[in-house]
């Protein structure tokens, strides 16, 4: 999510002017730091959700900066989200599997409906490869067996459905054995959720994707766009040739940095040999 902060997340939050922001999946707190700065400057409340925060996440300092406007939930997203009221914006970057993401979106919809409010502006990380159409499980035991694909700790290679025997991306994570198919992956969860909303006659939600840095999905309620026309303008800018050219430049810069690190690692390895 951090790579999307400056070009996407912060401009959208600025345009929305939220009173309550929710972050699911705080990890080391890199994006949380940006959200705290935003909340401090805009006077909004920040809820952070993570069942197992990392050591680098300094919760006491966050409380010192925001006081009562920072609320930490050391719980799963599925338990914490139903308790949070009046959410205007939600960042979902937790467990990247169909069951969790679909349940998170369903919970947000139920709370919004009960409050008579529009669905919150929701930003979802990892809607691109490798988890768009493949589940991963931080804790497989937390996923009901009926919704859990066969999995193992092994890496992924783009263009291959099966997991790699050696190497690959995210080889130390529990990944579904195969890519694609029903109820598999983050983007599939979004597709299914939107289809269910349309079947119920609740067709005010639209989806927009941002390519690069594992992808970012944006769910927005038309009723929020009516109240915040600047938000509509910001979303339109993400499809403009100028913004897309700038995104290509950011991706090329990131690629060059990866090449540099790889070449230095190879040189160091040759020296060790």
Image (spheres, rainbow, N blue to C red):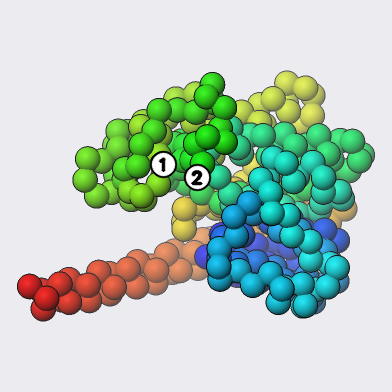
User: Alpha-carbon distance for marks 2 and 1?
Assistant: 7 Å
Q: Earlier in the sequence, mark 2 or mark 1?
A: 2
- 262 relative position to 70: left or right: left
Q: Sort mark 1 into few (<14), some (14-19) or many (20+) by Cα contacts within 10 Å.
A: some
Q: Quadrant of the C terminus?
A: bottom left
In the foreground, 182 or 94: 94
From the top left corner, tell me how far across and down residue 251 is, in percent.
Answer: 42, 65
Task: Mark yes or no: residue 61 visible.
Answer: yes
In the foreground, 95 or 41: 95
In the foreground, 109 or 95: 95
Q: Are marks 2 and 1 in contact (CB under 8 Å)?
A: yes
From this view, report whether residue 193 is shown above or below residue 15: above
In the foreground, 205 or 115: 115
Q: Quadrant of the N terminus?
A: bottom right
| Residue at figure coordinates x 79%, y 61% from the top left | 71
* Residue beneath disc 2: 138
| Residue at figure coordinates x 89%, y 36% from the top left | 114
From the top left corner, tell me how far across and down residue 189 is, in percent.
Answer: 58, 33
What number is the disc on residue 174?
A: 1
From this view, report whether residue 9 is shown above or below residue 98: below
From the top left corner, tell me how far across and down residue 248 is, in percent.
Answer: 44, 64
From the top left corner, tell me how far across and down residue 262 is, in percent.
Answer: 25, 69
- 19 relative position to 78: left or right: right
Quarter assignment of residue 151: top left
Task: Mark yes or no: residue 123 visible.
Answer: no
Q: Sort mark 2 into few (<14), some (14-19) or many (20+) by Cα contacts within 10 Å.
A: some
- 40 relative position to 75: left or right: right
In what element is the residue under mark 1? strand
- 123 relative position to 241: left or right: right
Farthest residue in the right direction? 116
């Amino acid at each position: 999510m951090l790579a999307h902060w400056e070009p996407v997340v912060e401009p959208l939050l600025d345009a929305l002017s939220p009173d309550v922001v929710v972050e699911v999946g705080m990890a080391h707190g890199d994006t949380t730091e940006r959200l705290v700065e935003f909340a401090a400057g805009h006077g909004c409340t920040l809820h952070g959700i993570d069942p197992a925060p990392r050591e680098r996440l300094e919760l006491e300092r966050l409380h010192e900066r925001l006081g009562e406007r920072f609320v930490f939930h050391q719980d799963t997203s599925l338990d914490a989200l139903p308790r949070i009221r009046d959410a205007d914006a939600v960042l979902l970057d937790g467990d990247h599997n169909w069951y969790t993401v679909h349940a998170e979106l369903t919970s947000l919809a139920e709370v919004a409906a009960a409050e008579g409010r529009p669905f919150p502006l929701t930003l979802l990380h990892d809607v691109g490869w490798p988890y768009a159409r493949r589940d991963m499980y931080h804790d497989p035991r937390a996923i009901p067996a009926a919704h859990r694909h066969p999995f193992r700790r092994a890496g992924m290679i783009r263009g291959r459905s099966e997991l790699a025997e050696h190497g690959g991306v995210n080889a130390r994570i529990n990944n579904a054995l195969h890519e694609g198919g029903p109820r598999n992956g983050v983007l599939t969860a979004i597709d299914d959720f939107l289809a269910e909303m349309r079947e119920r006659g609740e067709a005010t939600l639209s989806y927009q994707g941002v390519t690069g840095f594992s992808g970012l999905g944006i769910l927005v309620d038309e009723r929020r766009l009516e109240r915040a026309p600047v938000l509509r303008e910001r979303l339109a800018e993400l499809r403009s040739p100028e913004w897309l050219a700038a995104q290509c430049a950011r991706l090329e810069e990131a690629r060059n940095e990866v090449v540099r690190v790889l070449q230095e690692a190879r040189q160091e390895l040759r020296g060790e040999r």
